[in-house]
Image (cartoon, grey):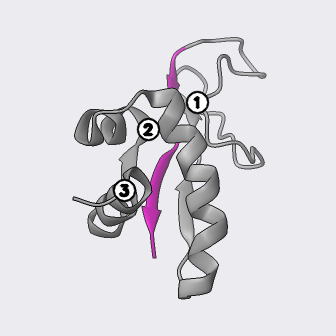
Amino acid sequence: MGTIREDITELLLQRELDAREISGEIGVSEKDVVAHLDHISRSLSRRGLKLVVTPARCFSCGYTFKDRSRPKKPGRCPKCRSEHIDPPRFSIK
């Protein structure tokens, strides 16, 4: 077991997960996971890797948050105002 960022990186190399799933696996808060993902994203380029983000999607109307740069789950859909959002998922390629 390494640092939190190393553990998150190892998980994301194996499979695609959302912040809540990462939080459960690593044992840190979702908020901390989001902060670590920002740093991991910047540091992966030195290793020739990339953090791949599958964007969040609204369950109600299907709106995809493809232009969103923050890894945090959106609070509400800008199109239909629903709060039922499928969170973004992360993997490393």
Q: Is residue 12 above or below residue 67?
A: below
Task: Give the left or right position of residue 11, taking residue 40 as reference.
Answer: left
Residue nearest the observer in this picture, 74 or 60: 74
Question: Which is more foreground, mark 2 or mark 1?
Answer: 2
Sooner in the amino-acid sequence: mark 2 or mark 3: 3
Q: Are marks 2 and 3 in contact (CB under 8 Å)?
A: no
Q: Which residue is mark 2?
A: 19
Report the amino acid beneath label 3.
Thr
Q: Which residue is mark 3?
A: 3
Query: In x, y percent, where is residue 27?
Result: 28, 34
Sooner in the amino-acid sequence: mark 3 or mark 1: 3
Which residue is painted at 45% across and 76% down in the image? 93
Which residue is painted at 27% across and 33% down in the image? 24
Q: Is residue 17 above or below residue 82?
A: below
Q: Which labelled disc corresponds to residue 9?
A: none
Q: Which labelled disc corresponds to residue 73?
A: 1
Report the amino acid beneath label 1.
Lys
Question: Which is more foreground, mark 2 or mark 3?
Answer: 3
85 falls in the magenta region: yes
